[in-house]
């Protein structure tokens, strides 16, 4: 059944109650789909925003209600059936039916998989101890919050976004914080050495102990709880509790069980369609054919990317033009620093700094073949929109002009586009 055959008797089922699933559900109705829309989510709460979990929510600056992506009324108006606190156990592609954890089944005409991912476990002995924690859900944070007391010793394994964001919250609350990163520098997968140095300096000045090149090999436990963290070089670090932040595992098991094409993510085309033409997939669980800006297959862990894919799915199912994929962007809040990133910097040939790193106000531009492929903005909210355009259009601007703050970015943009 293609989009032209869908009618008021058709059913679109969505597996996954995150932002991607919630967005796809309401957009289907906005695009005038007249049939049944059912969203099934494992967590018992409405779709919510995950990025604030390791920032404002962990710090108790906002409550659970502020995390909710869209109020219940939005789903009621869109006539979306919300089956929360339920889990899909199996996709029967032949019968086009879903099997739920309580044994119930129901059919679909089109299916959207938005199962996201889970925190990557640390594969070393002792990692199952009760005070070794992860951060992916509201429930995870609610376990962490009571432990964030002044004087306690927190060891964070992983110097990526989550690890550094939690470190910033914890040290401000008076905890003794140590970050152990296996790579030679923090944020090594996503940014240049100059940016890594900047963030290491900021954290150290705040009181965080940053240790790079440290491979965690095991733990010493007492009464079932970790007392210290051991590294391969023989060093140990005392801990009252440990947070593991070493990445995400895409939840692809349902798709694999259904025989869909999976390769470090559910493989989809530019419309987010899987190897089954009646099944789509969106969000962190997806290996996407990014035919817009990136022009390659990639799995992106990014809210804007997930929402963009939700728009593509809603358009495809309702027979509308599919919007082109744009430059991916990300953000991170640490202390009073707002980091906004656009594009992917891997493979860059030249780094240009515009602004003053010492004053914590700058943009780092990444160039390849003379063109801007990515930008990292720190406390430059006004300039970031221009930077997104520069990256999105892969503009060619001389490095000296990029670095020259006497010429506004908007003027550079107009000149390059002319």
Image (cartoon, grey):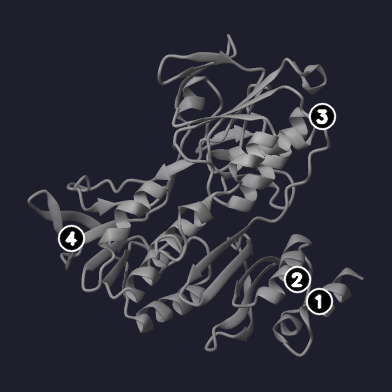
Pointers 4 and 2 in contact (C-beta within 8 Å): no
In terms of sequence position, does the residue under pointer 3 or pointer 4 come before the other? Answer: 4
> Could you give the CA–CA distance between mark 4 and mark 2, rounded to whole angstroms?
46 Å
- Name which quarter of the figure residue 80 lies in: top right
Quadrant including the C terminus: bottom right
Percent from the top left, x then y, of residue 276?
64, 21
> Could you give the CA–CA distance between mark 1 and mark 3, rounded to whole angstroms?
37 Å
Q: In this view, does 232 lie above or below 137?
A: below
Nearest to the observer: residue 161 or residue 47: 47
- Name which quarter of the figure residue 204 lies in: bottom left
Percent from the top left, x then y, of residue 275?
63, 25
Percent from the top left, x then y, of residue 408?
78, 83
In terms of sequence position, does the residue under pointer 4 or pointer 2 come before the other? Answer: 4
Q: Which residue: 43% across, 47% down?
A: 248
Q: Report the side of 402 relative to 99 (left or right).
A: right
Q: Name the residue under label 4.
A: 230
Q: Mark 1 points at which residue?
A: 410
Q: In this view, does 17 lie above or below 298?
A: above
Q: Mark 2 points at which residue?
A: 386
- Name which quarter of the figure residue 377 lies in: bottom right
Q: How crowded is mark 4: few (under 14 residues within 10 Å), some or many (20 or more)?
A: some
Percent from the top left, x then y, of residue 216?
24, 58
Q: Report the side of 123 relative to 249 (left or right).
A: left
In terms of sequence position, does the residue under pointer 1 or pointer 2 come before the other? Answer: 2
Q: Report the side of 409 relative to 251 (left or right).
A: right
Instruction: Give the label, 1 or 3, closer to the camera.
Output: 3
Callout 4: helix, strand or loop?
strand
């Amino acid at each position: 059944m293609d989009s032209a055959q869908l009618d008021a008797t058709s059913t679109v089922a969505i597996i996954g109650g995150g932002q991607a699933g919630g967005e796809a559900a309401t957009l289907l109705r906005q695009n005038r789909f007249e049939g049944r829309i059912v969203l099934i989510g494992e967590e018992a709460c409405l779709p919510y925003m995950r990025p604030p979990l390791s920032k404002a929510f962990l710090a108790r600056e906002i409550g659970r209600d502020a995390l909710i992506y869209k109020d219940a009324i939005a789903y009621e108006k869109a006539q979306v059936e919300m089956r929360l606190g339920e889990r899909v156990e199996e996709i029967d592609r032949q019968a086009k039916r879903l099997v739920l954890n309580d044994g119930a089944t129901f059919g679909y005409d089109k299916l959207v998989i938005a199962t996201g991912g889970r925190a990557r476990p640390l594969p070393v002995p002792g990692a199952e101890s009760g005070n070794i924690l992860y951060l992916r859900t509201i429930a995870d944070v609610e376990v962490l919050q009571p432990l964030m007391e002044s004087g306690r010793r927190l060891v964070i394994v992983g110097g990526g976004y989550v690890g550094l964001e939690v470190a910033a919250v914890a040290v401000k609350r008076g905890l003794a914080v140590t970050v152990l990163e296996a790579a030679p520098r923090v944020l090594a997968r996503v940014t240049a050495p100059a940016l890594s140095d900047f963030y290491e300096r900021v954290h150290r000045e705040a009181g965080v102990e940053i240790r790079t090149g440290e491979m965690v090999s095991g733990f010493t436990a007492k009464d079932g709880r970790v007392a210290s963290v051991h590294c391969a070089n023989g060093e140990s670090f005392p801990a009252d509790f440990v947070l593991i932040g070493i990445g995400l595992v895409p939840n692809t098991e349902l798709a694999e069980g259904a025989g869909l094409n999976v390769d470090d993510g559910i493989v989809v085309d530019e419309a987010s369609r899987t190897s089954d033409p009646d099944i789509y997939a969106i969000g962190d669980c997806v290996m996407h054919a990014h035919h817009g800006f990136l022009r390659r297959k990639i799995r992106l862990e990014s809210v804007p990317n997930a929402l963009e894919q939700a728009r593509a799915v809603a358009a495809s199912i309702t027979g509308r033009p599919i919007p082109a994929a744009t430059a991916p962007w990300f953000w991170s809040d640490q202390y009073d620093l707002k980091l906004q990133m656009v594009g992917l910097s891997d493979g860059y040939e030249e780094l240009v700094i515009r602004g003053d790193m010492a004053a914590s106000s700058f943009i780092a531009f990444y160039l390849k073949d003379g063109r801007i492929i990515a930008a990292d903005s720190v406390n430059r909210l006004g300039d970031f929109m221009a930077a997104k355009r520069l990256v999105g259009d892969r503009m060619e601007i001389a490095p000296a002009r990029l670095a020259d703050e006497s010429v506004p970015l908007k003027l550079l943009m107009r000149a390059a586009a002319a």
